Image (tube, grey):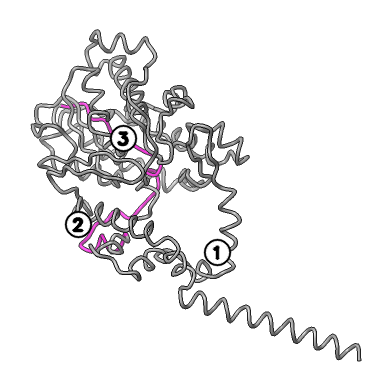
């Protein structure tokens, strides 16, 4: 009798287990979790899709050499939690003038060079012009990587001749990526998911499942993330939101292979600058997490991401020094300049606030003057002996494009 009861219990447990597995297979196979997520937040998902479509297809286009380029003469308002003007000139860069041959400083980089999230007049490039009383051309393009910085220098050699070239690096620039653009660049990088200018419901679902494994689409995975993700987000007293996973730096980014990748990019850029009778200075932009390291450790009891970023910047400085290049590390100025009332980064997004751009411009100006790249003038002399003051309202953040693997 006892054996029969045990067998019945075992059969029921086995049946439940099989039923659970079959249910998970059905849920994952039919994409029921992502479908439900789109149904619950259709407006938000569609808004994100339309935003990315605008970035990839309205503001940009494919390019055989660079993978993609920004379209020319854009003057449009972007609204994702905040509103700012997205501007480009005749060449697809964010400048007031097109006479690049006569500028004294040329900037190359990604969204941090572009100063994504603030108006052009509040960008660090514009502030640097005012501080140094020089003309500057900004070749920063949202979403670019070092190999694209170098290709830009190759494409427009006359615009990088007889200049001081500011070569801007953000933390994710140290990750080795595919450097062979081709006609299918948009497909290889996932941008083609946002091709439709009128997305259907299932276009939104396709975006949700783009990088998901089969397990990621199960109920078990959804419940796990529901529990864990809630613990990975913290609201700070000034309205800023801190994410445990916002630091992109991986431990293997300091590997020998990645160091060689960095060395090749820096060496090539240095060679291009030298061939054009220009001098090059490397500018390091830290992550928001590094700037808020105290808050991050306090809330998440995690030091590794901060340690990895410091190791990464140390590696960048060593490689730059070996090439005879000066390095401007903005980590300390942005951290020291950060206060709860005047944050140097946007409250939600991971880019610099207007005030952060001002702090960055001041540090870069003082460094260039101190090292003799720029002749000292009264404006910089005064600014290099006084702390910067907030002159622009800090607003909440925006989507950080560098967080998306496209």
Q: Given the current orientation, which residue lies at the most extreme right position? A: 1
**Label located before the other in sequence (1 or 2):** 2
Residue 118 picture location, percent across and down: 29, 35
Residue at label 1? 222
Residue at label 3? 168
- Along the line of sight, which residue is nearer the eye, 250 or 321? 250
**Label located before the other in sequence (3 or 1):** 3
Answer left or right for 157 relative to 262: left
Decide whether residue 295 is among the magenta residues.
no
Contact, CB < 8 Å: mark 3 with mark 2?
no
Q: Separation of disc 1 and disc 2 at Cα?
A: 35 Å
- Along the line of sight, which residue is nearer the eye, 195 or 177? 195
Q: Does residue 175 lie above or below 327 as drawn? A: below
Decide whether residue 175 is among the magenta residues.
yes
Q: Residue 189: which quarter of the image?
A: bottom left
Question: Which secondary structure, mark 3?
Answer: strand
Quadrant location of the C terminus in the rendered image: bottom left
**Label located before the other in sequence (3 or 2):** 2
Residue 384 picture location, percent across and down: 34, 12
- Along the line of sight, which residue is nearer the eye, 239 or 364? 239
**How many residues crowd around disc 1 within 10 Å: few (fewer than 14), some, or many (20 or more)?**
some
Residue 105 picture location, percent across and down: 19, 26
Q: Which mark is residue 13?
A: none
Range covered by the magenta-colored residues: 163-189
- Count up the numbered dots: 3
Question: Which secondary structure, mark 2?
Answer: strand
Residue at label 2? 62
Residue 50 picture location, percent across and down: 28, 57
């Amino acid at each position: 009798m006892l054996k029969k009861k045990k067998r019945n219990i075992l059969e029921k447990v086995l049946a439940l287990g099989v039923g659970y597995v079959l249910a998970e297979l059905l849920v994952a196979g039919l994409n029921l979790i992502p479908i439900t997520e789109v149904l619950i937040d259709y407006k938000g998902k569609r808004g994100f899709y339309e935003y990315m479509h605008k970035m990839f297809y309205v503001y940009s286009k494919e390019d055989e050499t660079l993978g993609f380029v920004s379209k020319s003469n854009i003057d449009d308002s972007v609204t994702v939690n905040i509103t700012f003007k997205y501007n480009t000139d005749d060449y697809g860069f964010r400048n007031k003038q097109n006479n690049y041959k006569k500028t004294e400083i040329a900037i190359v980089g990604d969204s941090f060079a572009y100063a994504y999230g603030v108006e052009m007049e509040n960008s660090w490039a514009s502030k640097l012009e005012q501080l140094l009383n020089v003309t500057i051309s900004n070749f920063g393009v949202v979403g670019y990587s070092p190999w694209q910085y170098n290709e830009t220098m190759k494409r427009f050699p006359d615009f990088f001749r007889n200049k001081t070239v500011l070569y801007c690096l953000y933390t994710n620039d140290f990750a080795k990526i595919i450097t062979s653009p081709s006609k299918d660049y948009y497909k290889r990088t996932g941008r083609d998911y946002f091709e439709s200018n009128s997305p259907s419901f299932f276009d939104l679902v396709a975006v949700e499942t783009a990088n998901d494994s089969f397990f990621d689409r199960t109920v078990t995975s959804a419940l796990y993330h529901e529990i864990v993700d809630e613990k990975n987000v913290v609201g700070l007293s000034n309205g800023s939101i801190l994410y445990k996973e916002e630091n992109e730096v991986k431990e293997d980014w300091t590997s020998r292979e990645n160091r060689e990748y960095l060395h090749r990019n820096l060496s090539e850029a240095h060679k291009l600058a030298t061939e054009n009778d220009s001098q090059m200075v490397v500018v390091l932009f830290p992550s928001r997490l590094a700037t808020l390291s105290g808050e991050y450790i306090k809330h998440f009891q995690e030091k590794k991401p901060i340690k990895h970023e410091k190791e990464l910047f140390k590696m960048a400085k060593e490689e730059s020094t070996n090439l005879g290049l000066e390095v401007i590390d903005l980590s300390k100025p942005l951290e020291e300049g950060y206060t709860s009332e005047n944050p140097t980064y946007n409250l939600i997004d991971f880019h610099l606030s207007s005030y952060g751009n001002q702090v960055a411009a001041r540090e870069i100006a003082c460094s260039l003057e101190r090292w003799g790249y720029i002749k000292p003038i009264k404006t910089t002399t005064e600014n290099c002996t006084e702390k910067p003051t907030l002159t622009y309202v800090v607003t909440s953040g925006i989507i950080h494009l560098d967080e998306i693997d496209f």
